[in-house]
Image (cartoon, coloured by chain):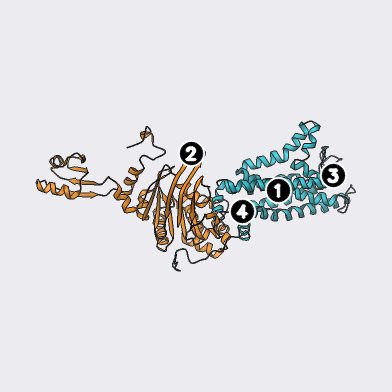
Amino acid sequence: MIEVDDLTKQYGDVTAVDAITFTVRPGIVTGFLGPNGAGKSTTMRTILGLDRPTSGTATVNGRAFRAAKAPLTELGAMLEAKAVDKGRSARNHLLAVGATIGVGRRRVDEMLDMVGLADVATKNAGGFSLGMSQRLGIATALIGNPGVVMLDEPVNGLDPDGILWIRNLLQQLAAEGRTVFVSSHLMSEMELTAEHLIVIGRGRILADISMEGFIAMSSQHRVVVESPDAQRLRDLLIGPDVSITSTEPSRLEIEGITAPHVGEVAAANGVVLHQLADIAPSLEEAFMELTADSVSFHGSVSAQGSAS
Amino acid sequence: MTSLTTTSPLGSIEGRPTSLVRVLNSEWIKMRTLRSTWITLVAIVLVIIAFGLISAMVSSGRISTQGGGPPRSVGPLSLVLAGANLAVLIVAVMGAIVGAREFSTGMIRATFSAVPKRLPVLWSKLIVFTAVLLPIVAVSVVAVFFLGMRVLSGAGAASVAWSDDGVARSVLGTAFYIVGLGIIGLAIGILLRSTAASIGVVIGAVIFLPALASALLPDSWDEVLKYLPSNSATAFTGSSQTGATLLTPGTGLIVFTAWIVLAIVGAAVVLTRRDA
């Protein structure tokens, strides 16, 4: 269990995290989403005790992480993959980290096997690819068999095989009753991994909600229709709360009414339909909509004023 | 809350409480698993022994040089400890790297994730560094003393005995000075977090600046300059030929030790307060 209460972190004049409060519960994978600069890493660093909060608290299993008796057995974290000494082998890196909780060679080799680095155990970590570094970081985080797992962008740099592996691993760890807290900017990945979402933008919590709830919350529910008589159907459907766009003569994308309603209108007026589909918004779209006002660094196109 | 089965991908291991002894072990593993540690240690031993022997041989005529060689005024003790001046640089740089390296590689975040209390990491780094360096440096300077004196007396040149007044103090004091500056370097490395910057500061400000200052400033400043780290150490290593006013050996030892303590306290305060 991770509890963040009224947490604020300022770096000089910049408020990275602004009075946020949330709880990460055991038993499920909780995704931590936000645009770059939203405060994800700052929040995680504060939970880990790497940064001191300006005000408020962050606790792991009910107390500050600093107070943990065997820290690695309580919270296993990976904030950045390259947090290793390039001159040391993967095995020696894990031996040094594991020594703080009294685990040795056998546990280290078990972890190297689990993350798939057994073949390069004696190679210097400096020569590792981003994906291999990521696996070493995950092994470092999990060496103490922690009840709480916190990973910042774990799929970064992994190949499709690795992404599938980490997705299954995280879900398995959550199913065992562990608290799993994962940040990502890959919304599509979160959609497949996380059950619960905490969305942060400009240092504030924008949503703390289940995955389904988050997607449903989006207003961008669309109906796609294909009909040889699309123009007539368009005139029948158009109204004050309805917006219709068309990319092809026979195709309509409708917002503001449901698919059954479109079907009924078409049937009542004898319009032939070739396709009628309800398009649920992807997490990506829901996310963009929610964070549109809270992106710290806009691209040059929308640099003037806030988007939407 | 959690019932973990043996089929867990993480196994069923139970970690033990993190203690100073376990952090010490961790820091010892870190130090011995870097190849640069061993290269540096070999370099330190070689420099102390080889330079001392060469200068003793050159001075006593065992090796003939063409107009070179140390000046006649250098005493036998300074001759055989000639390598110490270079060893000081190597050890100070090694200390700075040990202190700053984890910050520049990012390893410090893994370290502090395992030991969020942080201070045990500082104590362990200091203990491991001292426990490795002090015996090696002390044995090297004592060895080069006896070997060098044999070379000198064998050639009929002036030599001193271990039991002569102040000799043992100078030899062991030199070992203490070398390792002490390494510790100051380690503390500066933790303060500055950059290997390049801390090497610059420890060599420039701690080793060269005092010599430069005493050369450039009027004599009235000598009363102040004698309290600087390297000058206070010269009081008990007794190997310098500078005319600077020096503290007594006992006071010098106290002042130099105070510098070490000050550096450690500074590193400890900053380490616990600063965001990592």
Which element is circle 4 on? helix
Q: Is residue A88 visible?
A: yes
What chain letter is assigned to the residue under label 2?
A
Instruction: State the SS at label 1.
Output: helix
Q: Nearer the viewer, residue A16 or B23?
A: A16
The 10 Å Cα crowd at callout 2, few under 14, some 14 to 19, many 20 or more, is few
Whether callout 3 and callout 1 share a subunit is answered: yes
Q: Secondary structure at mark 3?
A: helix
Report the Cα–Cα distance between label 1 and label 2: 36 Å
Judging by the rendered image, the residue that carries numbered circle 4 is B121
Q: Position of residue A195 (x, y in %)?
A: 36, 56
Q: Residue B179 appears at what percent x and percent y?
A: 72, 50
Q: Measure the alpha-carbon separation of dots 2 and 3.
A: 65 Å
Work out whether residue B14 or residue A250 is closer to the camera in this orientation and state it: B14
Question: In the rendered image of this protein, does residue B34 appear above or below residue A109?
Answer: above
Which numbered disc covers residue B59?
3
Type of amino acid under label 4: Val
In the picture of the structure, the residue carrying the numbered disc 2 is A14
Which numbered disc, 4 or 3, marks the residue that appears first in the sequence?
A: 3
Structural crowding at the residue carrying mark 3, measured as other residues with C-alpha within 10 Å and reported as few (<14), some (14–19) or many (≥20): many
> Can residue B96 be seen from the camera position used here?
no
The residue carrying mark 1 is B261
Judged left or right of residue B233, residue B93 is left
Graded by Cα atoms within 10 Å as few (under 14), some (14 to 19) or many (20 or more), the crowding at tag 4 reads: many
**Three-letter code for the amino acid on which mark 2 is drawn:** Val
Q: For chain B, give the colour.
A: cyan
> Based on the displayed image, in which of its 4 quarters is residue A23 positioned?
bottom left
Q: CA distance from mark 2 to mark 4?
A: 30 Å
Kindly identify which chain the residue marked by label 3 belongs to.
B
Locate the C terminus of chain A by quadrant. Answer: top left
